[in-house]
Image: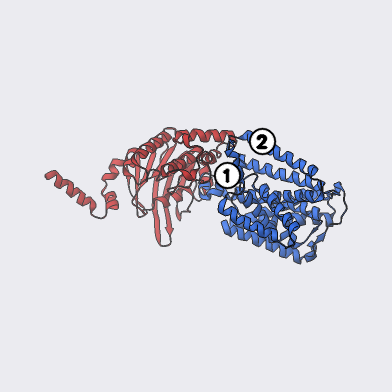
Amino acid sequence: MNPTGRGHDWLLHGVLLAVAIAFPFVLPSPFWVNFGVLALFYAFIGQSWNIAGGFAGQLSFGHVVFFGVGCYASTILQLRFGLNPWLGLPASALAGGLMGFVVAFLSFRAGLKGSYFALITLAFAEVMRILTNSVEFTGGGLGLLIPARPAASNFQFAERIGFYFVILALTVLSIAVAVWLKRSRFGAQLAAIRENEDAARALGIDVFREKVKVLILSGALCGMGGAFFAQYFLYIDPMIAFGVDKSVEMLLVSMVGGAGTVYGPLIGAVLLAGIGDAARVLTNVQGLSLVIYGALLVVIIAFLPNGLIDLFQRLFRRRGGSRGGA
Amino acid sequence: MLKVEGLTKIFGGLRAVDDASIEVPEGRIVALIGPNGAGKTTLFACIAGFHRADAGRITLLGQDITGLPVHEIARRGMVRTFQITQPFARLSVHENIAVGAYQRFARRDEAWEHARRVADQVGMGAQLDQPAADLTVAGRKRLELARTLATGPKLLLLDEVIAGLNPSEIVEIVEIIRRIRASGVTVLLIEHVMQAVMSLSEHIYVLSYGRIIAEGAPREVVGNPAVIEAYLGRGAAERMAAGHAGAGHA
């Protein structure tokens, strides 16, 4: 919300976008493009968490519920109703947003806050996982397989670079939303709610309504992440779509990078994808990446409570720049 | 401007506010005083919508606002501050005030400019970029005032914005409150600091054990035996009168 340094911000956005566009041309091997896709994917769903958890302070521990309904919405519409998977993107946004409304309306109407809200979101995700596991319509525990028919018109690309640019576009969209939140009335009201609900209410902010709105927004973005994921891997099942690990990853990338900041989730996501690949390449211990990541989280919370972005901002300031506002 | 009739609030077996009626005419500074635990803050919380009253009626500008949610009451022009200050701690002073200003201006540049003007008005112009968490007690009380003022209220409910300040800070904030009134805002304040109340307010209500026991101009109220007893204990008024008489004879 700092009015100064606006020029620096736009320069930063521009440079980062240029780097992201150049990346698959500089490092065109499938390994690196896959790395880019996963990093951006985590940045995108991490940002969706960050919008509710970081900007509005509504910490969710079951954000995967929005991701999962997005996965199933686009996949079921495609398999059972023949909808073009590109249209699955807006459909999954709708499904995620609707889920956001349901979760927010029920939880906030009941006055759940803080850790109680976090727990209820986890419960919603688990209920959805069990439901999709036991219902024929969703393919049950076997999951749903999307037949491979590579064609750009079919949202399946023969080359990974196609996916790369789709997820890049989604990530840019999510960052644009975050920048808008930093600079808008809605964002200021969310920050007020995050800091002190009673004081926000006393100033005339309809706290319940704004919290429901932000969860719809966050859920819609996260739902699109689900549609993208389904198209990239062409397979979903209840554990993939509603498993707790993705909820944790979304929260981790935001917290490690810097919750409530525009570029925090991106920083955290690049690190998570990097550690993941490094752990796979260097060892064959399953899940080692999350162990390393967890240890890193402990260190960061102890020494950089505002996330890694703090480190960047300190360096930036020391070089004589103004506050980055990122 | 504001009319409260027969307001009662019961917590368990305690009648925290008992059949209290007060009236705040437009353009005035009215004070609500009373000993600790008299129910002043509870009465305030009921008026502002934070507590639902068990009985009674509240009208603001001729409209019944009893039972409306807090934000709805605030949007109609009656905004409160908190006795225990509630800053948006990790936001700057400017951002804090802008949250209030955004209630009037949807556009960022207008809201920020308005916030800057309000900050100057309460003497915080030099602290705009400071995080709210770093402010002193006096600074936080000013910030409460600035934030509410930025919403463009018709009636300000000030909950002990003077208590806890040093004498020179008191002089400053009293001056600020006077200027706020001069700009057309009506003020209802709760206060402990008698001297400030005496010099600021035109009409005083005294609350004791949840009941309004006296009201009137400041001079009338301080001489009222019921008020003296409420503050100093049963029999205090007589002893004081006797003391004065004795001093007169000597």
What's the mark number on residue A252? none
Q: Residue at x 71, y 61 (%)?
A: A287
* Residue A62 visible in image: no
Residue A293 x, y percent position in the rendering? 66, 56
Instruction: Output the chain of dot 2.
Output: A
Chain holding disc 1: A
In the picture, which quadrant includes the C terminus of chain A?
A: top right
Q: Secondary structure at mark 1?
A: helix
Tell me if residue A189 can be seen: yes
Per the rendering, the mark at residue A189 is 1
Query: What x and y, as percent, mark residue A274?
Result: 71, 52
Of badges 2 and 1, nearer the viewer stands 2
Drawn side of residue A299 relative to residue B222, left or right: right
Chain B representation colour: red
* Dot 2: element: helix
Image height of A246 relative to A193, above or below: below
Q: Chain A: what color? A: blue
Above or below for B102 versus A117: above
Distance from disc 2 to disc 1, alpha carbons, whole Å, reads: 24 Å
- Pick the quarter of the image with the N terminus of chain A: top right
The residue where tag 2 is placed is A10
Considering only order in the chain, which callout, 1 or 2, is on the residue closer to the N terminus?
2
Lateral position of residue A134 relative to residue A48, left or right: right
Q: Label 1 is placed on what type of residue?
A: Gln
